[in-house]
Structures are given as structure tokens and as C-alpha cells.
Image: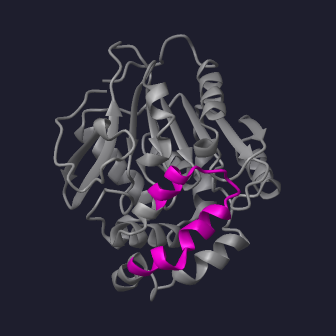
Amino acid sequence: MPNSANSDLSRLPDPWPNKHLSRTLCINNLDWHYQISTHPSPVARSILLIHGTGSSCHSWENILPILAQNYSVMAVDLPGHGYTTGALKEQLHIQEIAKELQALLLKLHLHTPNVIIGHSAGTNCALALALLDQINQPELMIGLNPSLISPPSLYNFFIGPLINPIFTSTMMAHFLANSIPITGMIDKLLNSTNSDLTASQRLQYKTLFKQTNHIHGSMNFMAASNIPELLSASTNLKGLMTFLVAENDPWVPQTSLQPIIQNYFPKATVIVKPGGHLFHEANPKETLQIIQSAIQQLPSKPVKEYA
């Protein structure tokens, strides 16, 4: 997993988590922001980290550097999120995002990662990405509080009114970018996840939601999800799977999520922990233990050596 040449990072705030690992790369209309750390060992496994809706690379602030001690690790800002800019509305569907992400990996001369870890809707993107190549699939996929169910009532209360054609417009996103800091909506959203975030972590989300690009992308991404279709297709995936289910997650409730996992991924390892929707941010050490334990179930050497 080679590092690409460093490029213009002027659009990133300073400081920003793991900014020293940040890179940007233009592919057609998309100007990607991603973070990458390459392990010196040519046989070190590669890991791709995919954040959830409304988040960015910053979500892996305390996880990426630790994983990088033993693996080659890459995290991306998905189209319409964080500091990846230029996404068209039709590119914000999960299947289209997966295709764009695959194009980025190929442009960087990367193959399918050995391990893909997704949080929330990032798990959905991970599944869609893995489905694009039936031959070279990841050895392991890890879903952290995966959004494999329809949006809950809290989602409908906070975000639902915003995902109709009027509110998903760029004009409305620009309006919200200016008004959200005043209304305290981000604090309310973060409180609703039942996650104990630090003041610094909350500030990172507030910084993101000052951007029209981020709001527009987040709203349209959520509006364009077809979960049942994705779940049906994902039964064909061959790699190992591990899912973290947080007991106190009101966004992806345990009682609704576990039957879905049992139905579509009956061989998956399911780990239940007390915590909220942003468990991996509030509890990075426990999350790393879960990741390391899952990777240890794999053969001692990767199935393939990825460039």
C-alpha cells in the first residue's frame, strides 16, 4: 500500500486528527481526501477504514495510528463528506460511492484490502465495495454498529425532514451550514448517539458541519440508501465477518439489528458491548481489541500479497 505524493491540504483545518497522514488526489470530478500509512513489511496486511454518515477520517483518530504499527492502513473521506469535494448528487448512492472508492484504490495501485472496517453506513459501503470484485474479496470485514436496518425514530426526528428534494438541495445545505452552529443541532445529534465524546471530538463534528459540501453529502447519502437490496447481494461474500453491536445505540438498536445479522450473516461473529452509536470513538481501546481479535482468526499470512 504505497503512499502517494503529498498534495494540497490547505482545505483541511489546523489542527486536524492525523493530518500528517493526509493526502489528496483528483479523479475526474472528485477531489479525494484520504489518510494513509504504509507498513514497511511487504507482507503486512492492508486495512481500509470507512466512516459513517456525517463523519470523516477524523472518526478513526485514535484507531488508525495504533493499527498502523502492524498493518498498512488507509482511511478515506467518502464523497460528499469531510474534505473530499466535488461529488455530484448521483454519486452519493452507496453503490456509486463503492465504485468511486474502487477507482481511487486502483488509481493508487492498490488491490482489494485484506480487511475492511466500516462504521454505521460505512459498513454498507464496505459490503458494496467487496461485491464489486467476486474474485478478490477481503479476508475479513468488520462492521461497527452497522446500519443494516431502516433508520430509527431518532433519525427521523433529527434528519428525516431534511432528506426530501427540497432540503437536499445545495441551497438548503448552505443555509444549514450557517445556521447549525447557532441552533446547537450538532450537540443534540451527538447526545442522541449515547456516546461519551470529549469536547475535542465534538468540536471536530461542529467543524465538519460548517461546510456546505459535508451537509449536502450527508443528507443525500442517507436519502439514497437501499438496504434490503444490499443485504440480499451480500450473502454471496466469502470472507469472515465480525459485527460490533452496542447495547445502548438508539440509532441502530440492538433488538432490530441482531435478527438482521443472524438472517443474512449467520456465520458472523457478533460482539455485544455496552455503549452508543459512536462506540469506536468513545471506546477506541476496546474497539482495537475487537479488531485485533478478529484479525488473529485469519491465517498467519495473507491469502494474497497486496501491492
**Placement of 259 over or under 113, stated as above or below:** below
Q: In the rendering, at what x and y percent does residue 21 appear? A: 31, 36
Residue furthest to the front in view is: 199
In which quadrant will I find the N terminus? top left
Q: Is residue 34 left or right of residue 276?
A: left
Q: Nearer the viewer, residue 224 or 229?
A: 224
**Placement of 259 over or under 140, stated as above or below:** below
Q: In the rendering, at what x and y percent does residue 136 appear? A: 43, 32
The picture quadrant where one finds residue 213 is bottom left
Q: What stretch is highlighted in magenta?
A: 178-205
In which quadrant will I find the C terminus? top left
Mark yes or no: residue 165 visible: yes
Mark yes or no: residue 163 visible: no
Residue at left offset 35%, top offset 19%? 39
Q: In the rendering, at what x and y percent does residue 252 appear? A: 70, 58
On whether residue 191 falls in the magenta region, the answer is yes
Q: Nearer the viewer, residue 97 or 192?
A: 192
**Placement of 96 over or under 175, stated as above or below:** above
On whether residue 89 falls in the magenta region, the answer is no
Q: Is residue 106 left or right of residue 283?
A: left
The picture quadrant where one finds residue 84 is bottom left
Q: Is residue 31 left or right of residue 285?
A: left
Residue at left offset 36%, top offset 23%? 306
Residue furthest to the bottom in view is: 166
Residue at left offset 57%, top offset 14%? 299
The picture quadrant where one finds residue 172 is bottom left
Q: Characterize the magenta stretch by its predominant secondary structure.
A: helix
Q: In the rendering, at what x and y percent does residue 116 appear? A: 50, 37
